[in-house]
Image (tube, coloured by chain):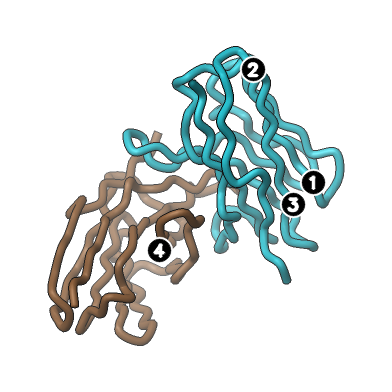
Amino acid sequence: TQLLEQSPQFLSIQEGENLTVYCNSSSVFSSLQWYRQEPGEGPVLLVTVVTGGEVKKLKRLTFQFGDARKDSSLHITAAQPGDTGLYLCAGAEGGSQGNLIFGKGTKLSVKP
Amino acid sequence: DAGVIQSPRHEVTEMGQEVTLRCKPISGHDYLFWYRQTMMRGLELLIYFNNNVPIDDSGMPEDRFSAKMPNASFSTLKIQPSEPRDSAVYFCASNQRGANYGYTFGSGTRLTVV
């Protein structure tokens, strides 16, 4: 079974700071997705990366897929209280249509 | 589009009782997934369907769990009999083209078995 390790597990920062969260595995994924989950709601897709080395930007969020497609990072610039939430990475196993493996997430708190 | 709709939002039941969770996927989505989320284990895939057919149920914990998808717009996850260790948030998700493409999740059902 492929595992995704996310770090840090918890992160508490002040508004305006920058941060990076990581998602690592020893296995190769055909694609990797990032989700954000708020309390009482389901995860919401932020981005999908499929090519090794790929970088995608979504406003203040920058996502990178590792060259070997085993790891990914999410960088947030000038964090805002609205960025607070649980950030989950999820990897799709190659050859499988249905098994998206989720990491346990990074719980981010941005204080005003 | 109303998104993926799950019911009920909250369920409290006594150990030994039958529990049925319901899901309506987004119209036109061919894949439907049931996940369970706990603090200890995170999000775990229980079962997924493609075109109403169960494809992989290897994540279903044991025989007490069963899932059906009688048509493209409805699925159920049943636990009989329920146990306290089944307490978790159960999510349904759907998409059009499988694991490499983004999932749309419902708001979940928080199940508490006492």
Q: Residue A36's mark?
A: 4
| Horizontal and vertical percent position of residue B40 | 32, 34
Q: Secondary structure at mark 4?
A: strand
Q: Amino acid at mark 1?
A: Phe
Q: Nearer the viewer, mark 2 or mark 4?
A: 2
Chain under label 4?
Answer: A
Name the element at disc 3: strand
Label 2 and label 4: CA atoms lie apart by 33 Å
Residue B17 on image: x %, y %: 64, 17
* Residue at mark 1 to residue at mark 2: CA–CA distance: 22 Å
Question: Color of chain A here?
Answer: brown
Q: Front-most of A64 and B87?
A: B87
Q: Chain of mark 1?
A: B
Q: Which residue is mark 3?
A: B24
- Closer to the camera in the image, A68 or A78: A78
- Asked which secondary structure carries label 1, the reply is strand
Name the residue tied to disc 1: B74
Which residue is labeled 2 in the image? Answer: B17
| Left or right position of B60 against B19 | left
From the viewer's perspective, is residue A84 above or below residue A77?
Answer: above
Q: Secondary structure at mark 2?
A: loop
Q: Earlier in the sequence, mark 1 or mark 3?
A: 3
The subunit carrying tag 2 is: B
